[in-house]
Image (cartoon, rainbow, N blue to C red):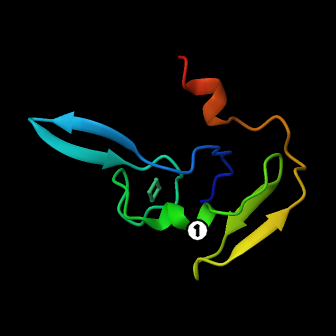
Amino acid sequence: MARLVKRFRNKPSAVTVGGESQYICGCGLSGNLPFCDGTHKLTQGEEAQKLYWYDEGAKRHSAADSHPGIRDDKLTKDA
Ligand code: FES
């Protein structure tokens, strides 16, 4: 099953758990979710207002935003 979720963040969030710093993935591309593995570097150069997807080989593709009503992290971050 696949899901289409908009992500605007292109870097991790730093949190402290038990006195230890952890970095939580904000881009959604990490291969070690929920933790950041550095894959967010792929998002450098993305243009605002464009929709992208990444294939299994980490290659970026642009796509028409034909799903303007899909849930995004801008809607949930204040919840
Ligand atoms: S924020 Fe997603 S891999 Fe770093």
The vertical placement of 17 against 42, above or below, is above
Q: How many marks?
A: 1
Q: Position of residue 70 (x, y in %)?
A: 75, 38
Quadrant position of ligand 1? bottom left
State left or right for residue 55 relative to residue 49: left
Quadrant of image for the N terminus: bottom right
The vertical placement of 23 against 36, above or below, is above
Q: Amino acid at mark 1?
A: Leu
State left or right for residue 50 relative to residue 42: right
Crowding near pointer 1: few (<14 within 10 Å), some, many (20+)?
A: some
Q: Position of residue 34 (x, y in %)?
A: 36, 50
Q: Residue at x 64, y 75 (%)?
A: 55
State left or right for residue 51 relative to residue 57: right
In the current view of this chain or complex, which residue is farthest to the top?
79
From the viewer's side, name the closer residue of 60 and 33: 60
Q: Residue at x 41, y 66 (%)?
A: 31
The vertical placement of 31 against 7, above or below, is below
Under circle 1, the secondary element is helix
The vertical placement of 24 against 39, above or below, is above
Q: Position of residue 57 (x, y in %)?
A: 58, 83
In the current view of this chain or complex, which residue is farthest to the left?
18
Q: Residue at x 65, y 29 (%)?
A: 74
Q: Which residue is mark 1?
A: 42
Q: Residue at x 62, y 62 (%)?
A: 43
Q: Position of residue 77 (x, y in %)?
A: 54, 25
From the viewer's side, name the closer residue of 74 and 44: 44
From the viewer's side, name the closer residue of 2 and 51: 51
